[in-house]
Image (tube, rainbow, N blue to C red):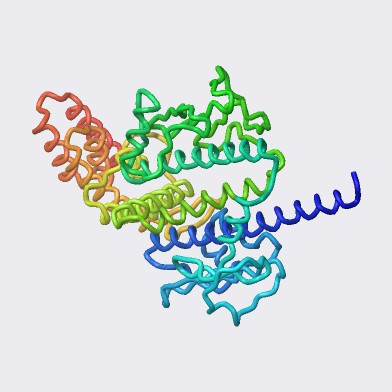
């Protein structure tokens, strides 16, 4: 290989890396903006942060931590102001120097060294448009370029299907299920604009999903033949005849790019993250409410797992206020169990605490907090039995809880309400006996 050939090859690689870096930069900025937008929806206001480090403190997100610095190693200049109702993300570019005087000039350019600026809903200064155009013009072997294009498109389409499944759950409160891939796709198409049916080689995707949240999306690959087995753990391959497999946990088998590794990945991730950001920005008010409630329930579970059931029940109540028809029976009963346990035991209960405390990462509620949590649990259980009048476990738990709180007439009224609708149900009599035994044990 001659010296001229080596120099040309080095220039081609440098050009590809430059294009990829610009796309990676825009991808990171989109991802940070997506996290900020999600925070605003959930908390009804923007986070307060003057730089990337402050933002990572306010928002505990892996996406923020992974994107604090641009592809050239410079931390993004971030200013998020809830009082002003706006945020700004600035990348310094390949020269690693900020130019604040340029930030107010709206401009599209090709220089990777220039600052890029994203304010609220859009880029006011950007070069990723140039990078996208340059990506399409990069000269590679024709066969390789075609193959890489098919691979990239299929990966993006698989990700689009995964996003569609998430949107379905967000908008319906459940995961899609169907007897076939066609059934599932028809369901997804009701709630998502982009639901691809086939991979880049024209083979229909094989999709399975279940109500426990597990799903699998499979492309048969370039040979158009599905395999009979799948890997036991995540793997990558450069053999595009192998099935491409994506699950609720991420890639189970991912195609590894050959000569266009970084550039193709940058293009794919840019397309994916831009789509996620635009989807979030176009959410209806109802979808935003559902997203906010979903985040509240996640926070409620986190509080409960740390022992702070009061905080969990308060967040559950916030969801009830947002959606009067809401009732998550399984979650509510899990939260309320510790206040409704009237099983008779000779093991003495620990003495009540006057003040809360932390022990080994677990929150120990005070006596007053336990009383408040029990009141919240009772209130939520009453709302739940109104919308679920045939759910005996709810009635039983509420009766037990009222008995433990010393509200015996209220406990009996709960049982009478169920008995009136189900006069021959023997469980009511059994519940009364259990309450009587509990009262004898506590009074003696």
Q: Position of residue 131 (x, y in %)?
A: 61, 58
In the rendered image, the quadrant that contains the C terminus is: top left
Q: Position of residue 221 (x, y in %)?
A: 57, 28
Task: Mark yes or no: residue 197 visible.
Answer: yes
- Left or right, 411 with reference to 204: left
Image position, residue 234 (x, y; %)? 62, 32
Q: Residue furthest bottom?
A: 101
Say left or right for 443 vs 175: left
| Residue at image point 52% right, 68% down | 118
Which quadrant holds the N terminus?
top right
Between 254 and 49, the one nearer to me in the picture: 254
Please tell me which residue lies in front, 1 or 47: 1
Give the residue drawn at x 44%, y 68%: 46
Task: Say if residue 313 shows up in the picture.
Answer: no
What x and y, as percent, mark residue 128?
A: 58, 60
Residue found at the very far right of the displayed protein: 2
Q: Residue at x 29, y 39 (%)?
A: 329
Residue at point 51% right, 29% down?
Answer: 218
Q: Is 79 placed above or below 377 here?
A: below
Q: Residue 155 versus residue 381: which sits nearer the camera? A: 155
């Amino acid at each position: 290989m001659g010296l001229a050939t080596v120099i040309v090859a080095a220039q081609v690689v440098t050009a590809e890396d430059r294009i990829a870096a610009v796309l990676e930069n825009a991808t990171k900025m989109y991802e940070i903006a997506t996290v900020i937008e999600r925070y605003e929806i959930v908390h009804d206001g923007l986070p307060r942060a003057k730089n990337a480090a402050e933002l990572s403190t306010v928002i505990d997100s892996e996406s923020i931590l992974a994107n604090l610095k641009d592809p050239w190693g410079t931390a993004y200049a971030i200013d998020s102001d809830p009082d002003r109702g706006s945020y700004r993300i600035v990348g310094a570019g390949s020269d690693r120097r900020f130019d604040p005087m340029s930030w107010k000039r709206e401009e599209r350019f090709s220089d990777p060294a220039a600052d890029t600026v994203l304010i609220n809903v859009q880029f006011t200064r950007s070069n990723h448009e140039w990078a996208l155009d340059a990506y399409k013009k990069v000269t590679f072997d024709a066969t390789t370029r075609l193959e890489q294009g098919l691979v990239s498109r299929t990966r993006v389409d698989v990700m689009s299907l995964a996003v569609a499944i998430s949107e379905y759950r967000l908008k319906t409160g459940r995961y899609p299920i169907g007897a076939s891939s066609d059934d599932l796709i028809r369901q997804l198409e009701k709630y998502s604009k982009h639901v691809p049916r086939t991979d880049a080689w024209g083979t229909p995707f094989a999709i399975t999903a279940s109500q426990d949240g597990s799903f699998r999306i499979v492309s048969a690959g370039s040979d158009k033949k599905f395999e009979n087995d799948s890997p036991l753990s995540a793997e990558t391959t450069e053999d595009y005849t192998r099935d491409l497999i994506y699950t609720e946990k991420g890639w189970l088998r991912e195609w590894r790019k050959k000569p266009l590794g970084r550039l193709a990945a940058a293009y794919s991730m840019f397309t994916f993250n831009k789509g996620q950001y635009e989807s979030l920005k176009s959410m209806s008010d109802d979808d935003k409410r559902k997203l906010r409630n979903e985040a509240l329930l996640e926070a409620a579970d986190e509080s409960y797992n740390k022992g702070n059931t009061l905080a969990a029940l308060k967040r559950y109540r916030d969801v009830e206020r947002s959606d009067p028809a809401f009732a998550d029976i399984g979650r509510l009963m899990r939260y309320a169990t510790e206040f409704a346990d009237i099983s008779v035991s000779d093991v003495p209960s620990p003495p009540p605490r006057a003040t809360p405390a932390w022990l080994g990462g677990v929150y120990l509620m005070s006596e007053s907090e336990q009383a408040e949590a029990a009141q919240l649990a009772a209130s939520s259980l009453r709302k739940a039995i109104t919308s679920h009048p045939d759910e005996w476990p709810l009635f039983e738990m509420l009766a037990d809880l009222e008995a433990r709180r010393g509200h015996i007439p209220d406990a009996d009224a709960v049982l009478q309400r169920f008995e009136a609708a189900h006069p021959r149900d023997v469980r009511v009599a059994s519940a009364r006996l259990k309450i009587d035994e509990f009262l004898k044990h506590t009074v003696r």
